[in-house]
Image (cartoon, rainbow, N blue to C red):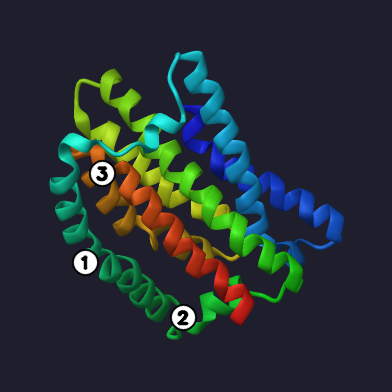
Amino acid sequence: MSLLVSRMVLFLLFQSLIALVLGSWSRSEGYWLLTATLTNLVSISFLVFLLRRENESFIKLFRFRGDNLKKDILIFAGLTLLCGPVVFGPNWLLSNWLWDNPEIPVAMMFRPIEKWLAILLAIIFPVTIAFAELATYFGYIMPRLRSGFKSGLPALMLPVLFLSLQHITMPFIPDLTFVLYRAVVFLPFALLIGIAIYRRPSLFPYFAILHGIMDFGTAMMFLIG
């Protein structure tokens, strides 16, 4: 169960270390892409260690199942059509509800950082998050909760909730409105992915790749901003 909160804690830990180096918590908030990348590397290490201890392979999580390939691709293609509205819809609605301006949370998160670091993170961040985030919540935690609970609901909802809540500390900005926004803005998307993988585990590698592609776009905002 400690793995459920591990990423949230690691985000906060690495941001605190960056704040110490920079001598400013406010400045550290702009380096959240770095804190996320460092967290991803630790998360991957955790998963490799835990799976080896169970005589399992980390890479095996990302293997495509040939026997269901055509059906998986069709189902995934259909679900992909829902991803746009499920990701961008809540963001627009929450931004307008909380601030009356969708540009405010963007400005709070995407602050100028060193160009060389932005380029480096644009490469490393999406790759590491593809192997770390969904693998933690849906590749490792969900199957083990599923075998541990009589009801399937906790096995589904706990990973979904903590996947959403982890964003509170990515970055942690001590503003209650921003904390509320980050806590729930990705909840619908997390629920969509969680239900899909819970019902059809063979879809996991497809969503992992999609997640990496989407976060490449996120990283690029530091270069074009």
Residue 153: give x, y in percent of width and height.
22, 34
Mark 1 neighbour class, 10 Å CA radius: few under 14, some 14 to 19, many 20 or more: few
Q: Identify the residue position indicated by label 1 in the image.
A: 81
Residue 99's label in the rendered image is: 2
Query: In the structure shown, which secondary structural element does the residue marked by tag 2 occupy?
Result: helix
In the displayed structure, does residue 78 sit left or right of residue 122?
left
Of 72 and 38, nearer the camera is 72
Q: Earlier in the sequence, mark 1 or mark 2?
A: 1
Query: In the structure shown, which secondary structural element does the residue marked by tag 1 occupy?
Result: helix
Question: In percent of the image, x 68 and y 68: which residue is there?
Answer: 118
In the picture shown, does residue 125 fall above or below 43?
A: below
Q: Identify the residue position indicated by label 3 in the image.
A: 203
Residue 213: give x, y in percent of width and height.
43, 61
- Mark 1 or mark 2, which is nearer to you? 1
- Mark 1: which amino acid? Leu
Instruction: Check the image and name the residue furthest to the front.
Output: 66
- Mark 3: which amino acid? Leu
* Quadrant into which the C terminus falls: bottom right
Residue 72's label in the rendered image is: none
